[in-house]
Amino acid sequence: MGGPAPVVAAARHAVRGVLADLPPGATVLVACSGGADSTALAAATAFVAPRLGLRAGAVVVDHGLQDGSAAVAAAAAERCRDLGLDPVEVRRVVVPTAGDGPEAHARTARYAALDDVAAAHGAGAVLLGHTLDDQAETVLLGLARGAGARSLAGMAPRRGAYRRPFLALRRTQTEAVCRTLGLDWWDDPTNTGAPLRSQVRGRVVPVLVDVLGPGAVPALARSADLLRDDADLLDALAADLLAAALVPPGADALGADPGPGADPGRGGGAAPRPAVVLDVGPLAAAHPALRRRALRSAALRAGCPGSDLFAVHVDALDALVTAWRGQGPVHLPGDRRASRACGRLSLGPGPTRRAGTSLLAPAQE
């Protein structure tokens, strides 16, 4: 008797590779939307996990953004149960439509739901069905936004409990897995609709392949792999730089700026200390690629939300280090401020404004 079809074997091999380090008895969950990618992933996991002594279940997140989404989620959950996955949970989430838009909010809500279910079941891993095509689309979106190496590095094969077994498989292969196994799947209408990623998938990628050939998509994904290695190294070096520049609490008593949160007009008592204080010297001497990464990390440590922290903010922080002309504080996301004085760069909550005072009074070096 012959073995499975080559495409089914490839899917199972990919899943086996990312589960091999889990101890027997561990629980693994598949994030299943009902599409071909996650349905193929659910089928491969249902086959592989028991043979590794693992318990395999699934989570179906209903974003509630389309009519009939509850029925689609219920059908996906039933398909997972038919494959032998257990437990299988459906989670309905509320996705705001304002602000960053439904795509970003849906992603945030989805991962929050996955985190919650994984914690409830003590899951050792959560599998995501992203493919090589998804990786290429992520790189293209990053290029269009002028992103740096970290964003162009795309999706990591592993990030915490999340694992992506199919990043080396094409979307056509996951569909072939489903057809070979006789599994139905749901085609999300937004994949050919208005969202930006859908437009890249349906319009940009076909033109790219038509002009550059079928190797264009794998090449984009390969670029992400190379950039991820570079970004990992640069991030590690930038972490060392940040550690060297950080001023410990109580160590900046030589007339340093009391920080963005201080109220210089209020007498008595010490001014509140900013969240992060940095020595400008090590930063100014560092390579720009490391300095900018260190400054971004410092802003995150000071409480800036990463989703709102853009290159323009890092540029402004960098100017406080390399182009200091006595300029006033830099306004950062999350109501944070950064200011420089006495060779110290202070990042923290914005000041409490009193009547008759200005938030833009220039600092003095």
Image: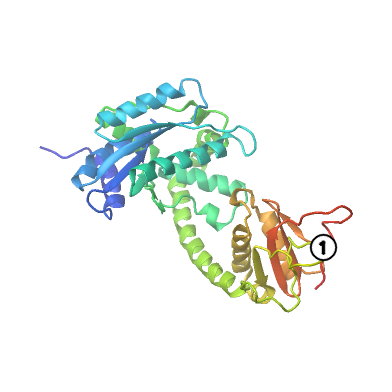
* Horizontal side, residue 37 vs residue 227: left or right: left
Residue 231: x and y in percent read 51, 61
Residue 69: x and y in percent read 46, 24
Q: Secondary structure at mark 1?
A: loop
* Horizontal side, residue 116 vs residue 96: left or right: left
Relative height, residue 249 to residue 60 (above, below) = below
Is residue 334 among what the camera can see? yes
Amino acid carrying mark 1 in the image: Arg
Relative height, residue 33 to residue 214 (above, below) = above
Is residue 214 among what the camera can see? no
Residue labelled with disc 1? 266
* Horizontal side, residue 6 vs residue 163: left or right: left
- Give whichever of 237, 131 is nearer the camera: 237
Dot 1: within a 10 Å radius of its alpha carbon, few (fewer than 14), some, or many (20 or more) residues? few
Q: Quadrant of residue 350?
A: bottom right
- Give whichever of 173, 131 is nearer the camera: 131
Residue at 42 percent across and 42 percent down: it is 116
Q: Quadrant of residue 1?
A: top left
Residue at 65 percent across and 38 percent down: it is 99
